[in-house]
Image: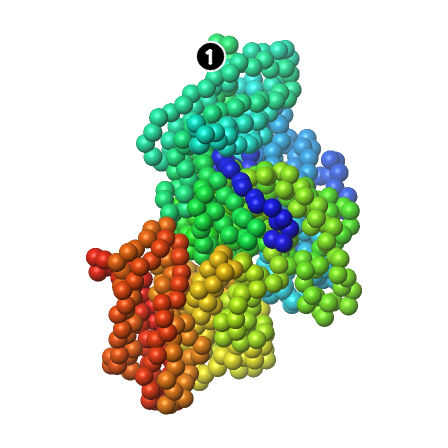
Amino acid sequence: MRHLSRLLTLPMLCLTLNALPSHAQESNQSLNGSWQFQPVADPGNVTPQLQAPALGWKKINVPDNWYRQGHNISGFAWYQTQFKLNAQNASRVAHLVFNGVDYAADVWLNGRYLGHHTGYFQAFEFDVTGLVKPGDNQLRVLVNSPLEKPEDWSLHKRLVKGIFSHHDTRPGGAWSERGQEKNTGGIWAPVELQFADQAAVRQLQVTPRKQATQAKPQHWEIKTEAVIRQHVSHETPVTVEASISPENFNGPALHFSQQQILKTGNNRLDLSFPLDNPALWWPYEHGKPNLYKLELSLKDASGKLLDRQQQVFGVREVKADESLQWFVNGRRMFLRGTNYIASQWLAEMTPTRYRQDLEMMQAAHINAVRVHAHVTGKDFYELCDRMGILVTQDFPLLWGYSDDPAFVTEARSQAKDMVQSLQRHPSIISWTMHNEPPWDSPWMAQKYPDYQPDINRKLDELLYADVSKLDTLRVVRKESATKEHEWMGWYFDHWLAFSRPAPTPWSTEFGAQALPNLKGLKRMFSKDLLWPDTEAKWREWEYHNFQRKETFEFAGVKQGRNIEEFIANSQHYQARLIQFAVENYRRQRYNPVSAVFQFMFVENWPSINWGIVDYWRDPKAGYEALRTAYQPVLPSLEWKQDEYEAGASPQVGLWAINDTWRGFEHASYTVTLYREGKQLDSLKLPLEMLPDSGRKLRDYPLPVLEKGQYELKAEITGQDGKSMGRNQYRFSVK
């Protein structure tokens, strides 16, 4: 974020669209279902004349990742399907749309080569007007999901796949020879034909601008651009009609109309919609995520509907100032975030599963999500729009990549795809181009003999410049910097080091691993592997991401006498570190801390990693610790250690933190000390809390301590006596 030298004020009205325009349901034909599938050796140079095999086909479901369909392969595989069209649709304007193929695809329709696409997350399409026919049609796709060359890890990678090709949390981990197993390849998102009559609306882009005046402080002009693809051989007059109406609230609708003369081929469409005093989109804890619906229709001179789109959008303004404080619609906001990788195989995630994760986040008072070093499924972003959850979006670059000109060109193209396909989501507030790039990762100098300090520097400068130009409505960052990744208590130092002043306003990674519960471990390991006591067993655990050195040497977690003790010790350590870190960050609110992102929310495959929720969505103890520490109104307890000697009389700082935009004049702060369940002492203080504030009330001296187990509880109550926030601090005296 050091690249921001000025105040960024980012007005925004964004359409919640798919990456490519979606049409009325009656104009679509799904091609999902049972396809034929066949892995093949590398065919070398793929040409339009390449023939698919005649025999050897198996069945596979589309959409899905091929690993989930029982094909543990990397490299090339053919897909094919037959579909029928009636004569009416075969004569219409038709576009073949793929919503996601990992990683590269070459496509043939009825023996005609359509073209090539690279990139796992983008939708892409082909104009197949006149190529489809009545009756039977055949579609073939050659998919290539290769491996990175081991010698390219981790400075010279060539796939824009982020965590899906190389990461600590993928099968095998980041530094293992097995670290690319269980490949994510395949046609993982829906495939469909989209139809229109005579002309089709494509490439819809919206560029909103807040045109505030003294008379109209909330005046917005919405510039809408699109391509209308005309398929008749003469000029044709059409009418473009648009309406804007509330989608999830009550209010008036607006209607617009414009005449256009279409020429054969592509025609530019430019519209400008005024929208005064809109119902703003707000994060869920500060208001309603108000959404509008835009209906855009294209009609010929007789009034016949040629094409139509219905989309949802939200109006909001976001900025980050020079001290890196966040503002939404002009109001300062503290981000309580988490890092998120929903699944190693994106086809596994349904709207229901995304909603489950997001509801668990909201229950833990998380208001922002960092999509960590990848682009996830479109349902996630649509749900964040509807649920009022902020998103900071990473481009899928993680550690080191080739500086070859061909890779730089490809990465720049895919970054443009990311922005154009996602920029209509009001939930997304920032783009980050590269996670821990080599030029910002001095730890790589010790790990790689061929490390050079400028690897990827030029690449990231180009990506930053490209995206800053493409999207002036959000914060754009070159990198998620290593200084923001505070791994005390896991990769270095002690977890109590979180008590020192934060080095940066944003902490975008911190945490510790923890074992899932026993039920989860039994799903993951056979009975003989459940208690690792040999090198062979430990290797299986390490394949499932368990970090032995960090767990035992840096964190000092005890294995205990049995698996139940190991689980308890591991989860206790993660929970203690998370709560201690978060409370220390929040006591530094805006001095300098303005955003924290715990690492990581869920485990993305059956594994042992940093998730506070396991792969089966059972919470660990760390989930409750984060939920406590992320309460918007928090009675924070400032403590320095969790063990004392008998006879000590330590002091605990009492803090009141209020992330809400409401003030509380007649609140109360109560703190109570217990020893082995028996109350020893209590203190009640009157409390006035300003909106969006945090302050230390006083130090609370504890009485002389004897041996035993202690608990200090704190609670903030309102004038009505209702609890607004609770906290506790457990410690032992020896």
What's the residue at 68%, 60% (across, down)? 440
| Camera-nearest residue between 392 and 483 | 483
Residue at the image position 27 percent from the left and 64 percent from the top? 686
The picture places residue 556, in percent across and down from the top left corner, at 52, 80
* Residue 6, image x, y percentages: 60, 46
Q: Nearer the viewer, residue 358 or 233?
A: 358
Tell which of 75 and 103 is nearer to you: 103
Vertical arrangement, residue 660 with respect to residue 293, above or below: below
Residue 147, image quadrant: bottom right
Q: Residue at x 65, y 67 (%)?
A: 175
Vertically, is 428 above or below 649? above
SS at mark 1? Answer: loop
Which residue is farthest left?
Answer: 720
The amino acid sitting under disc 1 is: Gly
Vertical comparison of 704 with 636: above or below:
below
Task: Name the quadrant containing residue 268.
Answer: top right
* Crowding at mark 1 (Cα within 10 Å: few <14, some 14-19, many 20+): few
Is 79 positioned to the left or the right of 406 in the image?
left
Residue 573, position in %: x, y?
A: 46, 74
**In the rendered view, does 579 fall on the left or right side of 674?**
right
**Residue under the image location 27 percent in, 60 percent down:** 667
Q: Position of residue 438 (x, y in %)?
A: 70, 60
Q: How many marks?
A: 1
| Residue furthest top as drawn | 302
| Residue annotated with mark 1 | 303
Residue 12 in view, yes or no = yes
Q: Is residue 523 left or right of residue 690?
A: right
Which quadrant is the C terminus positioned in?
A: bottom left
